[in-house]
């Protein structure tokens, strides 16, 4: 198969490209960074260098592909994160139509069933709706859970304050997934035929935040590490002090409120998907190695 994937050599796209190349497929990797060409070619893939803002480029990169993988690259400098996501989604949809691609695997997110109250995930909800309007195109929306690797962002808090926390408490559930597990699921979908518009959840573990703190703390030699709940205002102020743009901080706080209430996981729980391989304690070892 000829497969084109977006996302450059990110946490999902790199292992995805490796898996597909190993399976004998012709893989094109889209990246906005010309410095990535050598690394992409070393994987056995072809590099397509250009921007997701460039419709002509996307159309050319998609043309002739048996299947494509789409993801909206983060733009943390965007003045309106949801508007930015919509623009990327519209470009993808237009390029899919123009190129004649018939099979699309799209990276969405757990919580994308909701149109409001989920922070950055709202934009992925919008992209799902855009793709669902594509006539004659089969689309599989992948809805992974909360990435384990997001927990790396708490390393400085652990080092300097001796705690870990967010604007939700230790009893709140966190549905977790490893990017490598996501890549394997996407590779599986890209290599098999499917029809219509459908959703697949990808998750590795479900734990409360007290368990997350204990697992990470034990792995780094701090078994008494505690999860601390911040107010929304404290969480926002902390992100601003850490250098996050106000728009991004606002969105992350809103996502935290959806985790706190549990609404983010509602549709996931109704579907009860199979769990992937990487459990919290497995990731804790990776966290410790990086810590």
Image: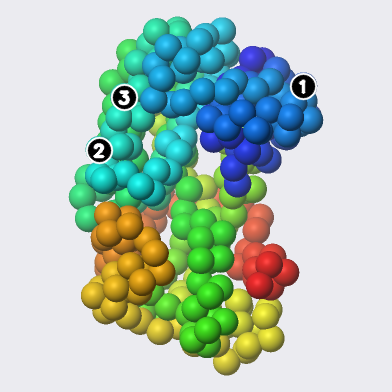
Q: Position of residue 51 (x, y in %)?
A: 46, 26
Crowd around label 2: few <14 · some 14–19 · many ≥20 (10 Å): some
Crowd around label 1: few <14 · some 14–19 · many ≥20 (10 Å): few
Q: Going from the N terminus, do you reach mark 2 or mark 3 first?
A: 2
Residue drawn at x 56%, y 59% is: 149
Q: Position of residue 62 (x, y in %)?
A: 51, 15
Q: How far apart in space, not on screen, are marks 1 and 3 (Cα)?
A: 31 Å
Which quarter of the image is occupied by the N terminus? top right
**Colour setting:** rainbow
Q: Position of residue 147 (x, y in %)?
A: 51, 56
Residue drawn at x 52%, y 87% is: 162
Would you say the residues marked 1 and 3 are in contact, meaning their CB atoms lie under 8 Å apart? Answer: no
Q: Can I make out residue 172 in this image?
A: no
Residue 233 occupies quadrant: bottom left
Which quarter of the image is occupied by the C terminus? bottom right
Q: Secondary structure at mark 2?
A: helix
Q: Is residue 152 above or below residue 178?
A: below
Q: Is residue 15 above or below residue 24?
A: below
Which residue has dot 1 on it?
Answer: 24
Mark 1 or 3, which is nearer the eye?
3
Image disc number at residue 90: 3
Which residue has dot 2 on it?
Answer: 83
Would you say the residues marked 2 and 1 are in contact, meaning their CB atoms lie under 8 Å apart? Answer: no
Residue drawn at x 74%, y 26% is: 41
């Amino acid at each position: 198969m000829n497969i084109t994937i977006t996302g450059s050599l990110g946490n999902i796209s790199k292992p995805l490209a490796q898996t597909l190349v190993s399976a004998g497929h012709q893989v094109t990797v889209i990246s906005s960074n010309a410095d990535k060409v050598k690394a992409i070619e070393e994987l056995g893939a072809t590099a397509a260098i250009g921007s997701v803002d460039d419709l002509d480029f996307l159309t050319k990169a998609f043309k002739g592909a048996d299947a494509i993988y789409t993801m909206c690259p983060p733009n943390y400098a965007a003045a309106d994160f949801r508007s930015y996501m919509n623009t990327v989604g519209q470009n993808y949809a237009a390029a899919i139509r123009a190129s004649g691609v018939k099979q699309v695997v799209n990276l969405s997110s757990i919580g994308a069933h909701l149109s409001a109250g989920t922070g950055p995930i709202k934009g992925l909800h919008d992209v799902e709706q855009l793709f669902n309007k594509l006539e004659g195109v089969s689309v599989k929306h992948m809805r992974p859970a909360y990435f384990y690797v997001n927990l790396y962002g708490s390393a400085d808090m652990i080092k300097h304050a001796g705690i870990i926390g967010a604007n939700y408490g230790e009893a709140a559930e966190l549905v977790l997934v490893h990017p490598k597990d996501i890549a394997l699921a996407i590779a599986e979908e890209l290599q098999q035929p499917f029809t219509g518009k459908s959703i697949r959840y990808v998750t590795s573990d479900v734990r409360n935040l007290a368990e997350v703190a204990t697992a990470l703390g034990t792995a780094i030699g701090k078994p008494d590490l505690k999860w601390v709940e911040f107010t929304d205002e404290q969480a926002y102020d902390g992100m601003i002090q850490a250098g996050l743009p106000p728009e991004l901080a606002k969105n992350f706080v809103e996502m935290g409120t959806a985790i706190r209430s549990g609404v983010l996981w509602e549709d996931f729980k109704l579907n009860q998907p199979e769990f992937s391989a990487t459990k919290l304690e497995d990731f804790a070892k990776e966290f410790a190695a990086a810590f």
